[in-house]
Amino acid sequence: METPAPGRTHRVVLVLLSLAVLHTSKAQKVQNDIDIYSLTVDSKVSSRFAHTVITSRVVNKADAVREATFQMELPKKAFITNFSMVIDGVTYPGNIKEKAAAQEQYSAAMARGESAGLVTATGRKTEQFQVSVSVAPAAKVTFELVYEELLARHLGVYELLLKVRPQQLVKHLQMDIHIFEPQGISFLETESTFMTNELAEALTTSQNKTKAHVRFKPTLSQQQKSPEKQDTVLDGNFIVRYDVDRPVSGGSIQIENGYFVHYFAPDSLSTMPKNVIFVIDKSGSMMGRKIKQTQEALIKILDDLSPHDQFNLISFSAEATKWKPLLVPASTENVNEAKSYATGIRAQGGTNINDAMLMAVQLLEKANQEELLPAGSITLIILLTDGDPTAGETDPLKIQENVRKAVNGQHSLFCLGFGFDVSYAFLEKMALENGGLARRIYEDSDSALQLQDFYQEVANPLMMSVAFEYPSNAVESVTQDAFRVFFKGSELVVAGKLRDHSPDVLSAQVRGQLHGENITFVMESHVAEQEEMFRGPKYIFHSFMERLWAYLTIQQLLEQMVSALDAEKQALEARALNLSLSYSFVTPLTSMVITKPEGQEQSQVAEKPVEDGPMGFGQSMDRASWKTGGGLKLLNSPPRLGVPGRFLAPPPPFYRTTSRLVLPELTLRTTVTAPPLAPVQAPSVILPLPGQSVDQLCVDFRRPQELVNLLSDPDQGVEVTGHYETAKACFSWIEVTFQNPQLQVHASPEHVVITRNRRNSAYKWKETLYSVMPGLKVTMDKAGLLLLSRPDRVTIGLLFWDGPGKGLRLLLQDTDRFSSHVSGTLGQFYQDVLWGPLDTADDRRRTLKVQGRDYSATRELKLDYQESPPGKEISCWSVEL
């Protein structure tokens, strides 16, 4: 490789601030002129610090100049450290500069009439970068992007997110994720929104105590949507989640190349009681779905309060109103009353944030003065608003000042901005000035879940006033070492630089308060052992800890700048800029300038999006085979059943089955043609019958019932419940709960929500999903069939059927694996069952005896919703419950 000659003219510049998925335009895609012949992703995660290299190689197969576009998405928290293009053996590197200097160079290009493009946020967690370059016939171009991030622990897991979107078949496509965690990897799981059963064969995972390797290397045929199509199925997210083992001390000090990082997360501590004020915006702009979702979330959050907690509600529009004059204990009676109050909130009027916030502080101060706050408890204020202040005090700076003076460092304030009509910068500064944080709530079908997830992050405070202490003769400098609160499921991280002649053992103390008492954790780490542990492995990114320290320092400096005064802000900015330049990080203070070959007229500028900037949303798996047993054996072609003039052959005598339901094989004879009937409907549930493969039982619910225990098998560790609306003749929700792994799947007509370790993940129906975790595989195909399968266990399926009889449906597979202890409305059919003979007056009917109860079974045609709409007609014995 060579760099451009010194005298070469570069007329065009490209300014990059953010980039991570390669694609071509539609016209190029059709012509396949620009061929991506290699795309590799190599991500090395060393002690939570991820170093990701994405390399794409393309060739112009046309006989004329074509434009190749490199488009990538990467996590918002990541910093780009390098981007380069190699064109015909010449390297065009990126150079990181102070933003002002880069802007000056870019402005010169703009003055020549060259165009510009922007990096934009494309989703809740990602940013998108795009660069284009002209490619001569037969010429090759190599793009390489490098970015780094520190994986934060969120509700008990670390998450590495990678985007896969080549938009064409790639001859050599490979992803490698190497994870090295000296503490030990406690669990590892993968999830993909594009994986098919065939693609899953290209995914391999290996793991030992401290290392894990995930490789995804699909062939060309595995990438194809179908043999006759050249389109790729690779389009979406690939996620790796994991957590680490933790010692009794809850902490781990790791050392490499003269730098250290101290991770602290003692999850075994008991939760501290909290006093929480929920401040809810009910202004006119909250009308409609926003207020409904807020109410839904608030009702579930109230249910999660501990009996040791105290709480109150404040709703506000032009005026603020408190639910109770004082904080009240979170007793069952008070929680139920608060839920009724929340349900009755109506949206109208202006937005008086100032009065509502001051009222919340006054409630806490009054309780404190009257000694009503439990000893060792923590005080929280959670504000939810969707707009800027329009009533009362409307000056954001004055509101921030009023709140800061009122709080006076005594309480933690968390601000949630609903949608994009609110100034996020205003909320973020107000939260950071008062010991909390801000969070954007995106307007979508899962907004209520976003609110619940945020609450779960702060629902379990474990320690307060946490301070890290290190010997002054060992440590030269550290990142933030004092934290107001430590919450369960998160992790406190301190990084630092060791002195040149530091002791052989680095010791540390972590002090804090728990339930009103002081607590101290003591830990130590042997420098030489730690250095050796990180020196050997080839699969880690070496000297990563120094970069981790720089990354964390910059992130914290940028955060401190939000609430700093002008003089202090300038000093913080200068330090963050210096570190950004020294370690080649593209941050909000720097830009990366890339030259392109002479003669190319197009230029682009890419600026790292801020949270208040414009927001765009970018929104495949073949339907899995699902067979629950064949239909009846018919003479000739299958006619309609249950029609006058068509008779079933006589059944065998009355008999009993043991533990398993078995139906007689039936034959059919035809006499006369039947008149047209009403459309065949899909039943509520289709039960496959174990022990044979010729029949199924169709179950509908007719008697009034709401909450239904559908099935429970303690030996299988699974329970299925549902809420059935008789008036609509459908389920409003179905819920599956597993004991191992501890996980809950909640399906509604809107979406599927998977909850694990208090963490919610929402998926829209027909949004492909492939998730593998210890003891469970979860898949959903484009038809919307969600399968929950475990080794040697019954497979449970959920489906939102949009054919005739639209609604939620439940499916069961491998039902012969039910234990003898299975029970429930549906589970009873897998116990001892007694079939009676056919009714002499109507041979389409017979009696089914289940656990001493008689059910009338009728032979009918039903739609099999296990087939894609409009479904397939099947004959089954229909039972109404």
Image: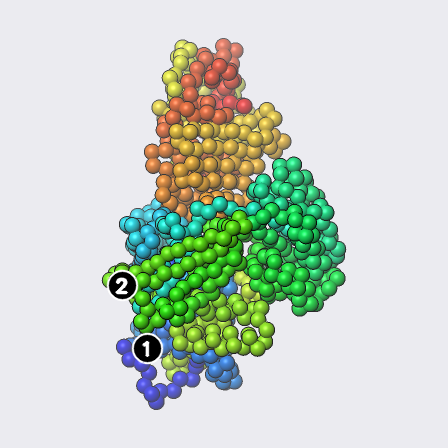
Q: Position of residue 244 (x, y in %)?
A: 37, 51
| Way the structure is coloured | rainbow
Identify whether 247 is placed above or below 422.
above
Where residue 695 sits, quadrant-wise, is: top left
Q: Amino acid at mark 1?
A: Thr
Give coordinates of residue 396: x percent, y percent: 67, 66
The circle on residue 528 is 2
The residue that disc 1 covers is 91
Q: Residue 231 occupies which quadrant of the picture?
A: bottom left
SS at mark 2? helix
> Seen in the image, is 880 located left or right of residue 288?
left
> Residue at the spot x=43%, y=74% of the render?
579
> Front-most of 78 and 403?
403
Horizontal and vertical percent position of residue 200: 33, 48
Residue 47 versus residue 302 in the image, above or below: below
- Amino acid identity at mark 2: Ala
Residue at image x 43%, y 81%?
12
- In this picture, is 881 found above or below 279? above
Q: Position of residue 326 (x, y in %)?
A: 70, 47
Q: Earlier in the sequence, mark 2 or mark 1?
A: 1
Image quadrant where one finds the N terminus? bottom left
